[in-house]
């Protein structure tokens, strides 16, 4: 008994002495530029689980710190990281006063990821997020100012696939899955609905964007249905205090495309604004001289003003409006140019007018958390006119959300609710068989990023959605990140997803809507499960910054929606409805890349292997138009700070067609030069250097010529394209 008493007494004495020596570290975090206190700043003591979050007065405290060498890392969204080490004596305990410097534009946008909803640094994300920062977006603005399609096509695992020879529609496919399985967001809110078809990425100009964030694989837990293959979040530019921006881009290409884009922004202490306005004029071009357009005529206008109010007590209100008008017309060149006859009749014309209103309210709370409310409403008019069919429709879509987020010492918590819906209504006159369609969905979600220690982070999430037509959906997701050391990081994640049936398919010729009658009775939502694993190695080798990344992925979609032919015909043509296939769609594969940077050189080598199958089709199981092997290279050289040269190449392996036959592999190469003179940047760019075209392998037009059909598109149609652009910023 005496021995037990002595042991307990000794333990209590040691505990008392240890706590007697332990002291608190406290202080205040401010904005270095104006001295205002910053709330929600994360202060972490490395090597321990201890840390703190600053309150609304910028004050923080970390308790029971043993005197000795102390290493603090201080992070806050929009500010540069403070990494400091000092000798903590524990005596007198003088409060710290730490001023944070606002991050430079390029640094901020590369390391801060908003798609996580926690505004975390990219290296702290358990879910792999790929970011195209301001430099990549700026470069794309000089190469292809009209849209972001070619920029997205440069990302490993993404394939931009043209779906219509007449209208030039394009589908974005991630990890071998069709574009309908990817959710496209703008500033965290859904951007396009089903009636938009495959025009989405063709209507977003790069000059209006700050960065692009991409999550591959199941992302429905945070963003709801439709994010089966992944999620693409387009982040708009924001005005910066004391840094007004005025810029203009002019571009002309050998394919008779002209672009004029402008962007202006400014901000003071209380208000700010940004406005983008741009137009594209594309003339129809018959590249192979067969009498039919390979590039459609396009006229578009895009206007996007935003107004910002910076209130007291860390309140921010953002109000925005978007107007997008596009007239896209392709087909028989004689018809497009106004000369119709018995043999010259075919054309497909799409006119789109979209008006979108959005608003965001952000509030930093006294407990260090933040409250966000956001909503948008979009009304789109689309008129489809062809030589055999006409259709006019309106689609209204809306989204609203309320979310709470807070960074604790070892947790990043996000929870919220959202409500969204769509309403498609046909307008007269209309000759389609399609019914009107509408749905609403209400959902709730929660996510927790739990930092177990300096090496291991666990992210878990759960969403519950209720759709008024298709019922309830439970969507779990979990991700792990393990930092093996300061060079090697591993991530493993997976989750469930779903997509409710949509009347519109990006792969369908507009003329076929005339014979589409909607859904078969009893149609079900598509449901999915997906997994991703990646390991990243980053080091310095003889002054080279070297990065190696290896990713493995697997996705499976049950109840995939397909068209099925009915027993009767209309006007001599079969009638179709959508139905669920008996077996699943699956995709699996690998993504590998090596990147090496040493000024003035930049080198990238990448390889993607994709095995995508429609398991319901035993005769032709390969999912059409998905390249099984794809190689990509990038070489860039900066002669000086004003002159940059780059060359890119992409090898696309054989692809399977719908009938089971395969295509030829091909090589695509592009060369770019950029030269800066004062406030102006000039870009000379050549795409498809070797003039690879599918129409060199045979005719793309299948008679009768007054109403032709077209083969599947597996290679470029527009051939070699040269453009010269000027970007002026003042």
Image: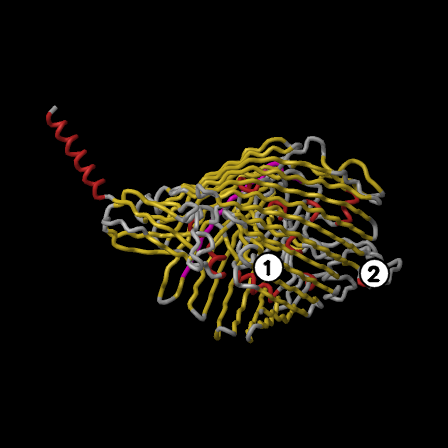
Tag on residue 400? none
Region of the chain picked out in magenta, as a range: 546-561
Q: Is residue 727 magenta?
A: no
Tag on residue 665? 1
Q: Is residue 723 left or right of residue 454?
A: right
* Visible residue check, residue 7: yes
Give the mark nearer the N terminus: 2 vs 1: 2
In the image, what residue occupies the spot 71% across and 54% down?
164
* Crowd rating for badge 1 (residues with CA inside 10 Å; few <14, some 14–19, many 20+): some
For label 2, the SS is: helix
In the image, what residue occupies the spot 47% across and 50% down?
551
Nearer to me, 313 or 385: 313
Which quarter of the picture shows residue 166?
Answer: bottom right
Q: Where residue 594 sits: x, y (%)?
A: 45, 59
Q: Where residue 46 sits: x, y (%)?
A: 32, 49
Q: How many marks?
A: 2
Q: Residue furthest right?
A: 342
For the residues carrying marks 2 and 1, which lies nearer the camera in this image?
Answer: 2
Relative to 361, does residue 701 appear above or below in the rendering? below
Color style of the picture: secondary structure
Q: Residue furthest top?
A: 1
Q: Circle 2 sits on which residue?
A: 335
Q: Quadrant of the N terminus?
A: top left
Relative to 416, does residue 484 appear above or below in the rendering? below
Marks 2 and 1, how far apart at CA: 34 Å
Does the CB distance between marks 2 and 1 fall below 8 Å? no
Q: Is residue 218 left or right of residue 661?
A: left
Q: Where residue 179 sits: x, y (%)?
A: 62, 48
């Amino acid at each position: 008994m005496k021995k037990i008493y002595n042991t307990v007494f000794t333990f209590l004495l040691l505990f008392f002495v240890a706590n007697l020596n332990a002291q608190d570290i406290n202080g205040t975090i401010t904005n270095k530029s104006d001295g205002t206190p910053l709330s929600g700043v994360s202060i972490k003591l490395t090597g321990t689980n201890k840390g703190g979050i600053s309150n609304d007065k910028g004050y923080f405290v970390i308790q029971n710190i043993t005197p000795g060498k102390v290493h603090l890392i201080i992070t806050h969204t929009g500010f540069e990281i403070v990494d400091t080490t000092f000798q903590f004596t524990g005596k007198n305990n003088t409060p710290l006063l730490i001023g944070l410097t606002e991050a430079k534009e390029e640094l901020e946008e590369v390391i801060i990821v908003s798609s996580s909803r926690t505004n975390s640094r990219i290296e702290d994300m358990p879910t792999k997020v790929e970011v195209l920062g301001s430099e990549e977006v700026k470069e794309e603005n000089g190469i292809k100012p009209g849209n972001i399609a070619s920029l997205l096509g440069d990302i490993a695992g993404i394939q931009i696939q043209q779906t219509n020879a007449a209208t030039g529609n394009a589908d974005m496919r991630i990890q071998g899955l069709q574009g309908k399985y990817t959710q496209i967001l703008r500033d965290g809110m859904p951007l396009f609905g089903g009636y938009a078809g495959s025009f989405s990425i063709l209507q977003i100009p790069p000059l209006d964007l700050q960065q692009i964030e991409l999550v591959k694989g199941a992302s429905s837990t945070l963003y709801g249905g439709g994010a089966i293959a992944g999620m693409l979040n387009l982040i708009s530019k924001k005005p910066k205090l004391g840094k007004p921006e005025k810029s203009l881009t002019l571009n002309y290409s050998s394919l008779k495309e002209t672009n004029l884009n402008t962007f202006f922004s400014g901000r003071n202490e209380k208000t700010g604004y940004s406005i983008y306005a741009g137009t594209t004029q594309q003339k129809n071009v018959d590249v192979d001289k067969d009498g039919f357009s390979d590039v459609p005529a396009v006229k578009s206008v895009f206007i996007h003003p935003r107004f910002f109010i910076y209130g007291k007590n860390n309140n921010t209100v953002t109000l925005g409006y978007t107007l997008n008008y596009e007239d896209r017309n392709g087909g028989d060149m004689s018809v497009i140019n106004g000369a119709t006859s018995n043999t010259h009749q075919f054309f497909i014309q799409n006119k789109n007018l979209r008006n979108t209103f959005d608003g965001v309210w952000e509030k930093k709370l006294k407990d260090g958390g933040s409250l966000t409310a956001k909503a948008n409403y979009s009304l789109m008019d689309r008129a489809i006119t062809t030589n055999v069919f006409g259709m006019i429709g309106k689609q209204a879509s809306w989204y609203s959300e309320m979310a709470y987020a807070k960074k604790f010492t070892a947790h990043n918590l996000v929870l919220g609710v959202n409500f969204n819906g769509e309403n498609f209504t046909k307008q007269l006159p209309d000759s389609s068989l399609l019914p009107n369609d509408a749905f609403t969905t209400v959902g709730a979600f929660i996510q927790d990023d739990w930092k177990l220690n300096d090496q291991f982070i666990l992210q878990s999430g759960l969403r519950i959605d209720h759709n008024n037509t298709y019922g309830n959906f439970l969507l779990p997701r979990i991700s792990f990140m393990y930092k093996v050391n300061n060079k090697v990081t591993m991530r493993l994640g997976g989750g469930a997803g779903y997509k409710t049936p949509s009347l519109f398919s990006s792969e369908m010729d507009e003329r076929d809507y005339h014979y589409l009658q909607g859904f078969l009775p009893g149609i079900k939502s598509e449901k999915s499960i997906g997994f991703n694993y990646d390991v990243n190695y980053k080091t310095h080798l003889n002054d080279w910054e070297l990065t190696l990344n290896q990713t493995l992925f697997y996705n499976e979609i049950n109840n995939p929606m397909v068209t099925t032919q009915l027993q009767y015909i209309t006007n001599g043509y079969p009638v179709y409805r959508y139905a669920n296939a008996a077996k699943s769609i699956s995709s699996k594969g690998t993504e590998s890349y090596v990147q090496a940077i040493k000024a003035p050189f930049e080198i990238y080598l990448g390889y993607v292997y994709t095995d995508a199958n429609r398991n319901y089709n035993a005769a032709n199981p390969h999912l059409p138009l998905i390249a099984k092997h794809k190689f990509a290279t990038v070489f860039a050289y900066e002669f000086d700070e004003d002159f940059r040269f780059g060359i890119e190449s992409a090898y696309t392996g054989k692809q399977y067609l719908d009938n089971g036959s395969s295509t030829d592999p091909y090589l695509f190469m592009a060369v770019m030069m950029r030269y800066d003179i004062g406030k102006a940047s000039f870009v000379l760019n050549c795409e498809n250097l070797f003039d690879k075209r599918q129409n060199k392998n045979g005719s793309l037009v299948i008679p009768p010529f007054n109403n032709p059909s077209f083969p599947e598109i597996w290679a470029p149609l527009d051939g070699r394209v040269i453009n010269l652009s000027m970007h002026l910023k003042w």
